[in-house]
């Protein structure tokens, strides 16, 4: 499945208990369609004492949320916006560039393919 977001994008949560919160995507779990967003959906993990955590106790960390519950933030409007892909082709039909464009027309990023 193609995703409308990428790692390090700033996203806004549009559904669930954390609706309206924003954060940066830390990692993506592509096979389960989940994303981990910085500072959103915090849960407690109870850990035993170990070398990594000598005291043990409760550690707070981000839990993943479904990719359909987030939208990338448009820098022009400063709100979450839907995204579409625009392809630019040459005369033979080969793809020259691929852009992520919001509904308001802002280009989020562009990938150019060299021959």
Image (spheres, rainbow, N blue to C red):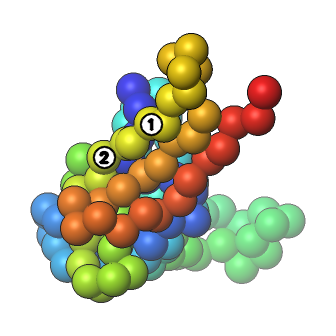
Q: Is there any visible trace of residue 45 in the rendered image?
A: no
Report the front residue among 109 and 70.
109
Question: Picture coordinates of residue 79 (x, y %)?
Answer: 24, 79
Q: Which residue is mark 1?
A: 87
Give the residue drawn at x 71%, y 79%: 55
Label 1 crowding class (10 Å Cα cut-off): few <14, some 14-19, many 20+? Answer: some
Number of residue marks:
2
Does dot 1 land on a helix, a strand or a loop?
strand
Report the front residue among 50 and 59.
59
Where is residue 23, by image quadrant?
A: bottom left
Give the residue drawn at x 48%, y 49%: 99
Question: Picture coordinates of residue 110 (x, y %)?
Answer: 56, 53
Does dot 2 land on a helix, a strand or a loop?
strand
Q: What's the CA distance linking mark 1 and mark 2? A: 10 Å
Is residue 73 depicted above or below 7 in this figure? Answer: below
Is residue 45 left or right of 54 when viewed as pictured?
left
Q: Quadrant for the C terminus, please.
A: top right
Between marks 1 and 2 in the image, the one whose residue lies nearer the viewer: 1
Report the front residue among 40 and 13.
13
Q: Which residue is mark 2?
A: 84
Is residue 112 left or right of 108 when viewed as pictured?
right
Give the residue drawn at x 52%, y 41%: 98
Question: Picture coordinates of residue 106 (x, y %)?
Answer: 36, 68
């Amino acid at each position: 499945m193609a995703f409308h977001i990428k790692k390090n994008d700033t996203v806004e949560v549009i559904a669930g208990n954390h609706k309206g919160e924003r954060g940066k995507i830390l990692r993506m779990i592509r096979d389960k369609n989940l994303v981990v967003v910085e500072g959103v959906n915090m849960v407690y993990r109870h850990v035993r004492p170990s070398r990594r955590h000598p005291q043990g106790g409760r550690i707070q960390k981000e839990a993943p949320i479904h990719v359909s519950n987030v939208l990338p933030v448009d820098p022009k409007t400063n709100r979450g916006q839907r995204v579409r892909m625009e392809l630019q082709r040459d005369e033979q039909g080969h793809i020259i560039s691929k852009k992520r464009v919001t509904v308001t027309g802002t280009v989020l990023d562009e990938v150019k393919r060299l021959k």
